[in-house]
Image (cartoon, rainbow, N blue to C red):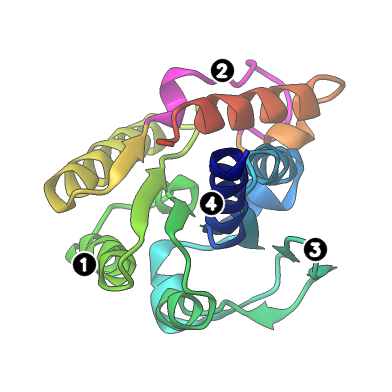
């Protein structure tokens, strides 16, 4: 009986101090983010998510102001949405929230132009901030997209390769979302799964379940 109580207290203590921080772009403002948070919370984790539409890694480094909508949620404490607010710096978030794990959902907004050395440095900086905080690092790459031009297709591949390589080099667990998602042709806007008529939210939730299944527990 005493052993059972000790094990139960350990389990409660473990879950009470297990915190996941998620930073993301517009994908997580919609059904994907809501489903991913729900799944992680069901695992007993406290989750803080900051999803800001239009963000690239640089925005989480510099704290740039964006106006494409955001969602902020903290398990059992706060849930709010808005349109105009400065993106919080990851460096500050890790200091304030002391997460055990940080999930970075970034890459989609990097495919529309050629990558620069600054893009690579921003990715390295974010991963470094997670490691400096002593948290597990997870980078979720962009899902399958329907981009309009060959140049954009080349941009998608460049972003995929760069993120995968930098994550591998720096010891951040990388999830290749594009390998288990499929954006239907000639539907939606080619980027946001929620924009796909009738089945968009279903596909977004399926993506979230795929990401959750690839997390390390």
Q: What residue lies at 16% left-to-right and 53% top-to-bottom?
A: 170
Q: Nearer the viewer, mark 3 or mark 1?
A: 3
Determine the image quadrant of residue 67: bottom right
Compare residues 157 and 32 and report the one nearer the observer.
32
Disc 4 target residue: 10
Compare residues 18 and 83 and report the one nearer the observer.
18
Q: Which of pointers 3 and 1 lies earlier in the amino acid sequence?
A: 3
Q: Is residue 178 magenta?
A: yes
Disc 2 target residue: 182
Tell me the distance, in whole angstroms, between the alpha carbons under discs 4 and 1: 40 Å
Tell me the distance, in whole angstroms, between the alpha carbons under discs 3 and 2: 33 Å
Q: Secondary structure at mark 3?
A: loop
Tell me the distance, in whole angstroms, between the alpha carbons under discs 1 and 2: 30 Å
Residue at the extreme left of the image, as rendered? 169
Q: Quadrant of the N terminus?
A: top right
Q: Secondary structure at mark 4?
A: helix
């Amino acid at each position: 009986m005493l052993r059972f109580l000790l094990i139960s207290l350990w389990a409660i203590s473990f879950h009470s101090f297990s915190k996941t921080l998620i930073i993301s772009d517009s994908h997580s403002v919609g059904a994907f983010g809501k489903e991913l948070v729900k799944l992680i919370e069901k695992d007993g984790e406290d989750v803080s998510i900051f999803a800001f539409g239009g963000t690239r890694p640089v925005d989480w480094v510099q704290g740039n102001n964006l106006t494409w909508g955001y969602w902020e949620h903290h398990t059992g404490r706060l849930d709010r949405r808005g349109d105009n607010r400065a993106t919080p710096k990851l460096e500050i978030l890790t200091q304030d929230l002391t997460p055990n794990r940080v999930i970075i959902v970034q890459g989609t907004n990097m495919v529309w132009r050629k990558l620069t050395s600054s893009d690579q440095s921003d990715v390295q900086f974010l991963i470094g901030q997670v490691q400096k905080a002593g948290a597990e690092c997870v980078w979720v790459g962009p899902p399958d997209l329907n981009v309009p031009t060959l140049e954009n297709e080349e941009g998608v591949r460049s972003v995929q390769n760069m993120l995968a390589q930098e994550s591998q080099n720096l010891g951040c667990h990388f999830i290749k979302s594009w390998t288990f998602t499929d954006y239907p042709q000639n539907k939606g806007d080619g980027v946001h799964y929620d924009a796909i008529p009738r089945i968009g939210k279903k596909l977004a939730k399926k993506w979230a379940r795929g990401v959750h299944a690839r997390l390390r527990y």
